[in-house]
C-alpha cells in the first residue's frame, strides 16, 4: 500500500519532469522563425505554476525544523 509520502514523491517527480519538458519546448520555440508570442506566454505561465507546485510539495515533504 502506498503512503501519502510516496504519492507526493511521485507527483513531485511528474511535475519536475513536465517542468524540464517545458524548458525544452520553450527553447525550441524560441529558435523558430515564426515565434508565437501567445503560445510562449502560456508555456512560461504553465512553467511558473509548475515551479510553485514543486516548491509547495517540497515544503510538504521536507518540514521546516528550526528547533
Image (spheres, helix red, strand yellow):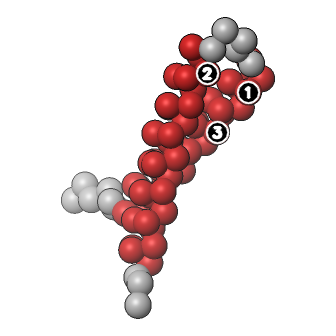
Does the CB distance between marks 2 and 1 fall below 8 Å? Answer: yes
* x and y percentages locating residue 53 in the rendered image: 54, 50
Q: Is residue 23 above or below residue 61?
A: above
Disc number at residue 12? none
- Between discs 3 and 1, the one toward the N terminus: 1
Quarter of the image where the C terminus is located: bottom left
Q: Residue furthest front?
A: 33
Quarter of the image where the N terminus is located: bottom left
Describe residue 58's horizontal placement relative to residue 51 as left or right.
Answer: left
Depth check, mark 3 against mark 1: the one in front is: 1
- Between discs 2 and 1, the one toward the N terminus: 2
- Disc 3 and disc 1: Cα gap in Å? 11 Å
Kindly identify which residue carries mark 2. Answer: 29
* x and y percentages locating residue 47 in the rendered image: 58, 37
Q: Is residue 57 above or below residue 46?
A: below
Describe residue 33's horizontal placement relative to residue 67 as left or right.
Answer: right
> Secondary structure under badge 2?
helix
Q: Residue furthest right?
A: 38
The residue carrying pointer 2 sits among few (fewer than 14), some (14 to 19) or many (20 or more) residues within 10 Å by Cα, namely: some
* x and y percentages locating residue 42 in the rendered image: 71, 31
Question: For residue 22, what is the image quadrant?
Answer: top right
Kindly identify which residue carries mark 1. Answer: 39
- Between discs 2 and 3, the one toward the N terminus: 2
Q: Is residue 43 above or below residue 64?
A: above
Kindly identify which residue carries mark 3. Answer: 46
Amino acid at each position: 500500500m502506498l503512503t501519502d509520502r510516496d504519492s507526493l514523491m511521485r507527483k513531485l517527480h511528474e511535475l519536475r519532469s513536465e517542468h524540464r519538458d517545458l524548458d525544452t519546448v520553450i527553447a525550441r520555440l524560441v529558435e523558430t522563425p515564426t515565434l508565437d508570442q501567445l503560445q510562449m506566454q502560456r508555456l512560461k505561465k504553465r512553467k511558473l505554476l509548475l515551479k510553485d507546485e514543486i516548491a509547495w510539495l517540497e515544503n510538504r515533504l521536507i518540514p521546516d525544523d528550526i528547533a
